[in-house]
Amino acid sequence: MLRATEQLLAEGGGDHVSLDRVAALAGVGKGTVFRRFGSRAGLLQALLEERSRELRDAVVNGPPPLGPGAPARDRMLAFLDGLGAIAEGNAVLLSAHGQACAEDKYDDPSYQSWHRHLSALFAEGRPDLDADFLSHALLAVFDGDLIRHMTPPGDPRRFTRSIQQMAAALLDR
């Protein structure tokens, strides 16, 4: 069902994804999709969660600088490199997810995980600043439309470099 969702996103963007279309493409009944994901938003949340699972595991169990043991600045830049790569490769998903989950964006499991990690790093690296706010502000930039705009074909990592520069500026005194 997640592969069918990916295919529909690639073919027509977020507006092309519906429980009916996913069910038809996956060869299952609509009720099966509904029972598993609950809604279109739940389906998109599950796909984003799948995309970010490897990054989340590396943050918790991986080697430095992404995993524990490195200074906050190094960990944040490594995390943003990984999150930026996910974003650059899944901008259409992020746009669809943002629209479908707008009302409960801050309750999304992926968002909460990213926010907790960034907040901890900001609190460690700049305890004089509002880590909670800065984490929300940084994550707000991960907008699918902005990512597509800031990722030209000739410079596929521009968005990631820019977000890393912004975070470094916040961490550096």
Image: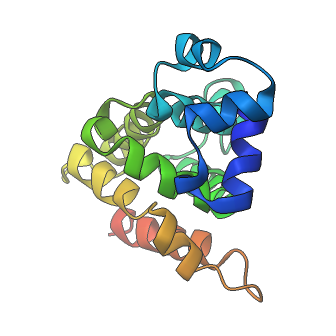
108 horizontally vs 158: left or right: left
User: Please, is residue 49 above or below residue 121 in the view?
Assistant: above
- Residue 123: image quadrant is top left
The residue sitting at 70% across, 49% down in the picture is 8
Q: Nearer the viewer, residue 90 or 130?
A: 90
How is colour applied across the structure in the image? rainbow
Vertical relation: 11 (above or below) 17: below
**For residue 61, what is the image quadrant?**
top right
From the viewer's perspective, tell me whether residue 148 is left or right of residue 153. Answer: left
Q: Residue at x 60, y 32 (%)?
A: 20
Question: So how many labels did they put on this image?
Answer: 0
Q: Pick the quarter of the image with the N terminus.
A: top right
Say if residue 68 shows up in the picture: no
Residue 161 in view, yes or no: yes
Q: Nearer the viewer, residue 99 or 29?
A: 29
Instruction: Measuring from the top left, give residue 126's x and y in whole percent.
Output: 30, 52
Taking the spot 46% from the left edge, 60% from the top edge, the residue there is 142
Q: Nearer the viewer, residue 62 or 128?
A: 62
Tell which residue pokes out farthest to the bottom in this image: 154
Task: Measuring from the top left, give residue 166's x and y in whole percent.
Answer: 42, 72
Give residue 129's position: percent from left, percent from top.
20, 54
Q: Which residue is located at x 67 percent, y 34 percent?
A: 22
* Quadrant in the picture for the C terminus: bottom left
Indicate whether 126 appears above or below 62: below
Q: Percent position (x, y) of residue 80?
A: 57, 56
